[in-house]
Structures are given as C-alpha cells and as structure tokens.
Amino acid sequence: MSSHRLAFTLVELLVVIAIIGVLVGLAAPAVQTMRESSRRAACQSRLIPIGMAMQSYHDRWLHYPVGTVAETGPVSSVAEGDHHTWLGRLLDLLDQPVIAARIDRSVSVYDEANAAVMELSYSGVQCPSAGLDPNNASSFVGLHHPTEKSIDENDHGVFVLNLPISRDDITDGLSNTAFVSEKQTPFDDLGWLSGTRATLRNVGGGIVASGDPFASPPPSTVGSIGSHHPAGVHMLFGSGEIRFTANETDQRILEQMVDRRDGQLPQQFQSLETLRRQSVQ
C-alpha cells in the first residue's frame, strides 16, 4: 500500500521562500521605476498649462507677467514687502478663477487678507515627486538670471523685478530661452504666492541633483534649480517645449538657456567635443 506526502519538507519550504524573495527583490526596482516614470510624466503635464497660460497672458497684455513686485530691489527671501509673483497673475488663465478672486493685490502677499491663498496647497504648481515641506510651496520657479545674484530689475532672465518682459525683449528666440524650471524646497520656503526665491531662481549653481532639503542659504541668496527626479529637471521654454535637462549639463549651456539676450550661438546644439575644445583654448 503506497503512502502519500501531505506537506513540504523544511528544505523545500525554504527554497520556495528564497525564490519568492529573489523575485520580489527583482520586481521592486522595476515597480519603483514605473512609479517615478508616472510621477515625472505628471510633473511635465503640470508645466504644459503653465506654458499655455504664459502665452495667453502675453497675447492679452503684450508682455509676460513680472517676476515679482517690490518698491526697491534687490529682493531678499523674507516675508516683508509686496512680492506678488508671476504665478499669481496666471491663475485666471490656469482656470482657477476662485483662487484668483481671493488675491488682494492692493496689499502685500503676506497681509492677512491674502493668508488663505498663501497657505493653500495648490497641486497645479507641485511636482508629485517632490514631497513638499512646507506643503504650500511651489515646485516650479521662473528663471530670473543666468548666474547667482539677487533678484532685481537688471536681471537677464524673463521673470525679473517690476519689469514686464515682452517677446521683443527675448532676442535669443523663445525656443532658445528657458522660462521655468523645478527647484528643491528648503524648510523656510515662503510659499507659492511669494515672489522671492520661493518662485524665482537662477542657474548660477547648476542643477542641484541632491542635497539637504532643510538647508537654507542666506536671505540675499536666490539659489539654483533642481528636482527629485533621477538624473535631471524639467525646463519649460518660451516656445512651449518642455525639455528634461540632465544634471550634468554644461554650465555655459544652462546660462545661455536662461539669458534672454546674450546673442551667442546656442551651445546646446554643439557637440560635447566642441565644448571641450573651447574650454582648452
């Protein structure tokens, strides 16, 4: 009479567990990559309406929204002054009339009259990969200058202090000029309605690939761009094109992208070998 086994042996059970563990270990990075790919696509999709709103704003007013407003420059990252920013002026064109109607531009963005909007966590200006802290911060920033300097009226980007920039002022061409990028958020970020380094940046420090999100520079420092995406950041150009720009992009290329009127041949179209030869000369 034959006997039948009714259970696994210990060795067989351990082998099965080991195989399952290996399969889970192999699948986890792929799942994480898929999640990040989805978040990156969502981030890019949130830049598309911003680009369209900027062009509609120009069609209506014959210039782009000013980067920020203050009685005098330069602008420091402190909650003092007018500081109404370019993002707030796009809200009607971003199909956010309720939020736009709650902004009182006759007083500072830090006034109690604007507190409800200032404290709002607005997903339309937030990257899903960012994990923002504070949660009313913006992931997207207008580019005010190609090198590190305080925000002022004499900057060479598109979003500057008090000065409305039109297409005629962008002599390098819209397709060669970066308008908006992403940033990493320090703990003392003043929020998406504040026209300070909270919504304006330069590329003087290149692209910040990683860093301490709680570290904060002095109030007079604006800081550079960056993201929580692996390998690079999204940059929105005046033509409406969105390019994913690698962290290792040559500093001269970044500066040319942001400078609206440098008149130089676009180095982003040149080969790396050409750039190396130029650096040796």
Image (tube, grey):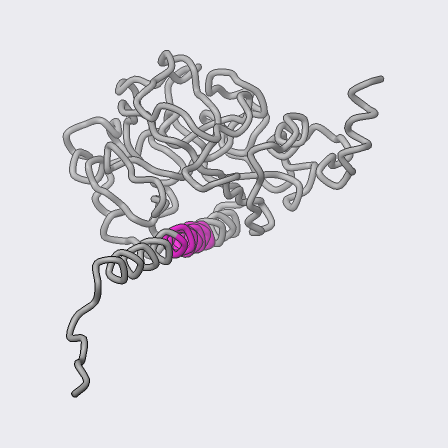
Of 27 and 35, which appears nearest the observer?
27
Residue at image position (51%, 47%) is: 58
Q: Is residue 178 above or below residue 215?
A: below
* Residue at 23% across, 37% down: 135
Residue 173: % across, % down: 68, 42
Residue 31: x and y, percent? Answer: 38, 56
Against 96, residue 235 (above or below) is above
Quadrant location, the N terminus: bottom left
Residue 63 vertical position relative to residue 45 in the rendered view, above or below: above
Q: Residue visible at 70% across and 37% down?
A: 172
* Nearer the observer, 122 or 74: 122
Quarter of the figure with the C terminus: top right
Q: Does the magenta stretch include residue 138?
A: no
Q: Which of 265 and 187 is in front in this view?
A: 187
Q: Can residue 93 be seen in this view?
A: no
Q: Main secondary structure of the magenta part?
A: helix
Q: What stretch is highlighted in magenta?
A: 26-48
- Give the percent coordinates (x, y) of residue 51: 49, 50
The tally of labels here is 0
Q: In this view, does 108 lie to the left or right of 251?
A: left
User: Is 43 in the magenta?
Assistant: yes
Q: Is residue 6 visible?
A: yes
Residue 186, relative to residue 93: is it above or below? Answer: above
Q: Position of residue 209 (x, y in %)?
A: 48, 31
Q: In this view, does 192 lie to the left or right of 50?
A: left
